[in-house]
Amino acid sequence: MIVVKIGGGAGITAESYANFAEDLAALEMPVVLIHGGNAEFSQLSRDLGRPPRMVTNEKGRVSRYTDSETIDMMLMTYAGKVNKRIVAQLQAAGVNAVGLSAIDGRIATGRRKSVIRVIEDGKARVLRDDHAGTIEQVDTTLIRLLLDAGYLPVITPPALARAEGTPINVDGDKLSLELAIELGAEAIYFFSDTPGLLADKDDESTLIRQIDIADPETALESAQGRMKVKVESAIKAIERGVGRVVFSDARAEHPLQRALDGEGTVIERLSPGS
Amino acid sequence: MIVVKIGGGAGITAESYANFAEDLAALEMPVVLIHGGNAEFSQLSRDLGRPPRMVTNEKGRVSRYTDSETIDMMLMTYAGKVNKRIVAQLQAAGVNAVGLSAIDGRIATGRRKSVIRVIEDGKARVLRDDHAGTIEQVDTTLIRLLLDAGYLPVITPPALARAEGTPINVDGDKLSLELAIELGAEAIYFFSDTPGLLADKDDESTLIRQIDIADPETALESAQGRMKVKVESAIKAIERGVGRVVFSDARAEHPLQRALDGEGTVIERLSPGS
């Protein structure tokens, strides 16, 4: 069983989804597909005259402020348009797909951070009515039921706040990793609009082909910024039983077939080490 | 097993969904929930500056022209916002709900009417790129799988065009009836923002309490316009094995409990007749 995460970047189009559908139709292996929807979400936000409001917390981390209307726009794009367009593409390719949010069947539940502290114009402020959250538990019962019956589950944020029973915005990569760990996936493939992890994020020719987690210090040395977070998460997932973590390009033809053939960045335990 | 359809009218709010969730949590019977989303859809259409375009066909029937962007707005509201808001309300009430469109698992497939002939300003015109359609087949495999595992399926249009593999706009009442027939439901409950079927559609005191389908001519005599279509569909569903068809009020507290206790319009076979 493999987990495939397709990012929601602007470079990933309806044509990309068709390319994935074609590869998935040819694959004889159970797959759980997870996707984002960020570009569509940002577009809808702008079209509705409510562009994303980015806030910076006290540690300098930038995130999107997620009020109730923002969650509705996430539901519309992630769980509505993108999820069902992908499912329809898969159905058109002959794959019996079932689209779900992580709210459905309590796939992912967590804690809502209803109050956030941010720095705006140099001043500390408290923002309420936030609906972002963190995943505390994943439940793969529904996913296993669908896989065993031959369906391909297609899953997207939001998740469900345990206490409030309301949708919470959670990170799609984190959702994918937690599901891959809980499902004991032999591999997880992250597809985005880059060829993989890059030593220089502005230069696609600096693709890192392989990272051996037996030597995590060397592995982390070359990784910076957001890439460091990705490598750290990958190492943790492998330590918790996932076979390997691959970062590959969503924009090519046969994106999944290429990644299965070794294109992109492959993170795994190569040497017997530590 | 019962089928419950909640309409998408403007009178049906988040509070109504909470009322249904409370009743469903107390009910010890398998339920399939189907819902609309018309008010939310129209609102989004207006907010995006693309109000519904109504067209009249050669027989005088008025329908909404459904181009590709319109389908996307349907996916956003029906399958995104409304579906997941209902599922979250159910989860908050302790009901393990799973939200699906009729595209997922090929629940409903049909024929797309890509070209429609309409009358505009007294002239016949042909409109292309329409994504409305009619249901030709329902497949309850996925629904039964979920029911048997203790989940409550929450289903909404669109459905899937068999030939094109694209979403098609289908009638939610028709979807509900076809699923109720295929599932052999003991009853189907239609909830909208009226108390039931009214002899005079502008006067809620003219509620018709009971219609005996053993005497269909009398049954149809009092029914006019859209109501006639509803009664005819109900009669067909009962002839195809559904126990009874009930039209009841979505706006009250305990809407489902009231309907189960006999409020609204009950259509069934009372006398042994024809």
Image (cartoon, coloured by chain):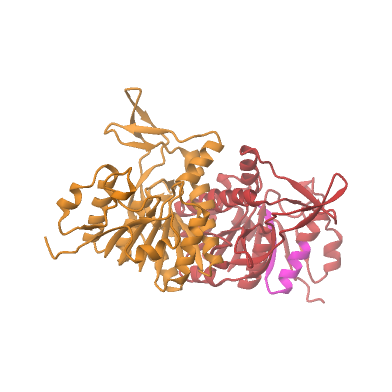
Chain colours: A orange, B red
Q: Quadrant of the C terminus of chain B?
A: bottom right
Q: Position of residue B228 (x, y in %)?
A: 81, 59
Q: Position of residue A148 (x, y in %)?
A: 42, 73
**Looking at the image, can residue A17 be seen?**
yes
Q: Is residue B245 magenta?
A: yes
B260 on left or right of A97: right
Left or right for A234, reference B200 = left
Q: Quadrant of residue A130?
A: top left
Q: How many marks?
A: 0
Q: Nearer the viewer, residue A198 or B235?
A: A198
Please state the horizontal and vertical placement of residue A14, each as a whole percent of the image. Answer: 52, 54
Name the residue located 67 percent from the left edge and 70 percent from the top edge: B243
Q: Quadrant of the N terminus of chain B?
A: bottom right
Q: Residue at x 30, y 36 (%)?
A: A61
Quarter occupied by residue B190: bottom right
Q: Is residue A182 left or right of residue B201?
A: left
Which residue sits at x=77%, y=62%?
A: B231
Q: Is residue B54 magenta?
A: no
Q: Nearer the viewer, residue A127 or A13?
A: A13
User: What's drawn in magenta, residue-wise?
Assistant: B231-250
